[in-house]
Amino acid sequence: MTAQGPAASAPAVNDLSSFWMPFTANRQFKNAPRMLVGAQGMHYTTADGRQVLDGTAGLWCCNAGHGNPRIVKAIQDQAGEMDYAPAFQMGHPAAFALANRLAGMLPGDLNHVFFTNSGSESVDTALKIALAYHRMKGEGSRTRLIGRERGYHGVNFGGISVGGITNNRRFFGTLLSGVDHLPHTHLPDRNAFSRGQPEHGAALADDLERLVALHGAETIAAVIVEPMAGSTGVLMPPKGYLERLRAICDRHGILLIFDEVITGFGRLGSAFACEHFGVLPDIVTTAKGLTSGTVPMGAAIVREGIHDAFMSGPENAIELFHGYTYSAHPLACAAALATLDVYQDDGLFARCADLAPHWEERVHGLKGLPHVIDLRNMGLIAGIELEPKPGKPTERAFTAFLKCYEAGLLIRTTGDIIALSPPLIIDRDQIDRIFDTLGDVLKTLD
Ligand SMILES: Cc1ncc(COP(=O)(O)O)c(C=O)c1O
């Protein structure tokens, strides 16, 4: 269990046993470690000195690529100037500047920003705001939360409760009470090989009416969905689906939360998915691309009316009993402000939109390769679904992951689905390299 690397700045590591790795097959990894020791632009450097093309923007987060000098400098400067400042009853200018900046990027009156340190925390923050909002308005009976099957909303208890992943229910007990779920929107029989939004499935949103009839609208606080579900296999919203959800929520006074932890910051070619799809939610959750993955940070961004409902009590009262030691951390704020500058000055969201047609052609060029049962794409995202090996689900896609890594390409797999989401700085040649490499690997899979 050793893994030593040549990079001068990386510590040599002889013992891998202490680090309990997240979402990792620890014993398998430690028997054959895959160590990254550097990152620049579109590439990682491995411990054995190889360059690996980043087909996943880290974990859907490094939208500005790696080692951008402007972001690096902003973080370095901030560390020297003020390392930390409490955000409870104290403030620092970058936090306010960043909140204003985000409010300006989001559509409609999504104008108020609550800072967190991750997507999971953004989700739990949004759920708490939704519950407290109804109570502030005198509708304290609205305590139910509605998620969706195959939803991923991070790993905290709120997020795993509204999320729709079996393993969370299998391992972590009964979770939050008073939660129900919409059906997922993955209809491979009807929508396989769709380009962009699939044709079929808008009516699945009507299931919310069933839940309203079952529980009573007066008990439901909020519905949370990913506008495009990334982590559970790249599931695009059927045409008209999000609009229907919005209409039903409006009809019944239910808040609609879009979890944009993946779709935020240009992934679909617009700043946010809500703008892309033209559907305005009541709360947007973000993280990842906010700092291009450089410093942990997330945010829940709420509409004017929700925020204002909290601002009615005595002025000396804390309006929302919630916050994190590292909310609006100065390093994260500096990183985020610099990241947003890079997105804007380098036109990265437009770049994503410009590259999307070529991306789409290359994704669908994989049709007909062995075991490929579905291909789906939007912006700079692709889902490549493989037929699972009989009795050995996940093995085929994981083998593809290992072979791609050996061939100099980082992909991500979830179940037997390969997810691609490169940094938005990618160029056409690099897109071609991703699909050439992946195509070659797919041909070798048994
Ligand atoms: C939609 C969505 N929500 C929440 C999260 C959790 O984010 P984090 O891992 O930063 O807690 C993720 C992570 O992939 C995500 O995709």
Image (cartoon, grey):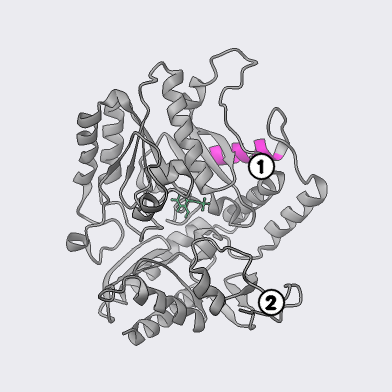
Query: Which span of residues is magenta-colored?
Result: 94-103
Quarter containing the C terminus: bottom left
Check the image and report above or below for 59 versus 386: above
Disc 2 on helix, strand or loop?
Answer: loop
Say which residue appears at 21% left-offset and 50% top-offset: 201
> Farthest right residue?
80
Q: Which residue is mark 1?
A: 326
Quarter containing the N terminus: bottom right
- What amino acid type should be assigned to the residue bearing mark 1? Tyr
Q: Which residue is mark 2?
A: 14
Answer whether residue 84 is visible to the viewer in this image: yes
CB under 8 Å between discs 1 and 2: no
The x, y position of residue 359, in whole percent, is 39, 69
Magenta stretch, main secondary structure, is helix
The x, y position of residue 26, in whole percent, is 52, 69
Q: Nearer the viewer, residue 357 or 390?
A: 390
Label 2: how many Cα within 10 Å (few below 14, some 14–19, many 20+): few
Going from N to C along the chain, the mark reached first, 1 or 2, is 2
